Amino acid sequence: MTLGHPAFPPARRRLSLRSLLILVFLSAALYAGAFPIYVFLRVGSATGARTPDTEAQAVAAATADVPRDAALWFAFGLLLLGLCLIAIRRRVWQPLHALEAGLSRVSEGDLTTQIPVDGMDEAGRLAAHFNEMARVLRHRAEEQGRFAAAGELLAGVAHEVSNPLMAIAAHAENRLADPGVTPDQREEMQQVLRQAQRATKLLRGLLRFVRASERHVASVNLNDVVRSALDVVSYRFGVDEITVGGRLDPHLPPVRADAIRLEQVVVNLLSNAIDVLRAVKPPRRLTVDSSVDQGDVCVAVADNGPGVAPDVVDRLFHPFVTTKGHRGTGLGLYMSRQIAREAGGDVTLVPQPDGGGARFLLSLPAAVRHGATPEEAGAPAVGGGGGGGEGGGGGVPREARLAGMRVLIVDDEAAIRRPMAKFLGRRGAQVYEAEDGAGALEFLQGQTPDVILVDLRMPRMSGTELFAALEAAQPELAARVLFLSGDVAQLSEPGNTPVPRERVLVKPVELADLEARVAAFLAGRAARKAP
């Protein structure tokens, strides 16, 4: 797809529809006025006689041929009307009928529809535009189909990928929590944990980006959106030798929007900048800033590339306009602006000096704050190319936060279940294990744990089936279930029992976070029971 208008197929030039309609109108007017004028002139020429008798005879002679002339004129009119109808039918009715039929076929899903282009008049150009539109829609549908298939494939393997990641991170955290680990071993385990955390952030970002979900408007911190978007594209920074800088305002007020859709906007702006920077020689710089300007919360994405060509600026946010040739869809900036405008904001191109690169600004109105506390003072948006996390076990509290609590872990993979049990046991919990939902039901016949950690995908009985069985037979135990899943979209599939999102832990989850979530869940249940 190029930036220009669609290329019209070669066709013969002919009279435009506007000229044709003017010609038909003039012909009709001439036909309607010519015969009365003809009769008037004939009668007028006969009224110049000297006597009444001779004048009457002259008028009678002059009008004697009028009936014959009227019949001939009427026949000529019928012929002229037929020619006009034929011209209108060929030039107006037939193209409009073909266009209507083409639109009907497209609306039924046939994107291979093409209509004939007989000339380069208005109807011909309309047909050419329709054919180009159908071609673009067909290509976009194919791309969307591949994208959706990739998303489904990624979501399908997310569970299989997240389990090994969680097992690796869990073993590393358990080793870091062991006081007998040597400094060299601790450094190695911290490196293993950082890489597992990096892979985890990338996996979660990809899942958020490709998984279609219902819109959820809430209070959103744009700094968090920017960090998530940077995680999605961070793998490209090192490969393309791009230095990322900028500063996120630590006192940024929240906005009301859908966080996932806003992340798609920022990912698109970042991806566009990365694509542009790949075509220039190093140093390549990408800057991401957040700020507040006159009540709007803003995120600016700038690069030191060649900038946007002047002839493209006015059409940059139009659909199907791209500077990437066949690699681009021409919908990224258009959809980004639509998403921003749905939230009451906008995406604009900020004019830059010649050679100053491109700078895009996402602006959204600030939401009303109710006692929100600013996040801690921040540093640059990102320090390099790719994410590492904090080193694992150092921040884990050492007191027994879960002392005396009974926890049942239901997971079919021992490589995940046993490290979790070992870690929670060190925190004072009494931990029990089950390999699947059927084993958990058997255990629950004689035991009443305080928390039940349930994996979603398991043989014999899945996590959702176990939850549905508990909802029906033992609702007090169903209220104690926390889910573990690498793909939370399963919870919204038809037939599954609705589960509150706050009770879902997305795999791979760090053991320290798992402990904190379990402790918070237990504290919340205790607070609800208190009088």
Image (cartoon, rainbow, N blue to C red):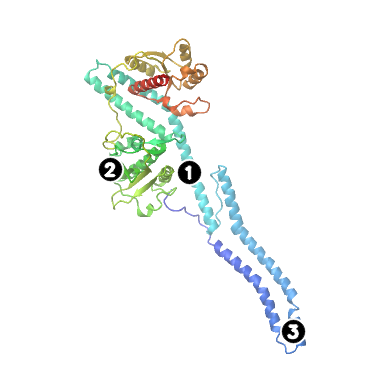
* Residue hosting label 2: 285
Can you tell which mark lies on residue 12? Answer: none
Q: Nearer the viewer, residue 32 or 367?
A: 367
Return the disc, 3 or 2, that comes first in the chain's sequence: 3
Give left or right: position of 231 versus 96.
left
Neighbourhood count class around disc 2 (C-alpha, 10 Å): few under 14, some 14–19, many 20 upward: some
Give left or right: position of 18 versus 177.
right
Q: Amino acid at mark 2?
A: Arg
Taking the view exactly as shown, the residue that stands out farthest to the left is 183
Q: Nearer the viewer, residue 476 or 266?
A: 476
Residue pictured at 43% horizontal, 27% vertical:
501
> Residue 217: percent from the left, percent from the top?
43, 36
Return the disc, 1 or 3, that comes first in the chain's sequence: 3
Could you give the CA–CA distance between mark 1 and mark 3, rounded to whole angstroms? 78 Å
Taking the view exactly as shown, the residue that stands out farthest to the bottom is 50
| Secondary structure category for the residue under label 1 | helix
Q: Quadrant of residue 266?
A: top left
Q: Amino acid at mark 3?
A: Ala
Could you give the CA–CA distance between mark 3 and mark 2, rounded to whole angstroms? 99 Å
* Residue hosting label 3: 58
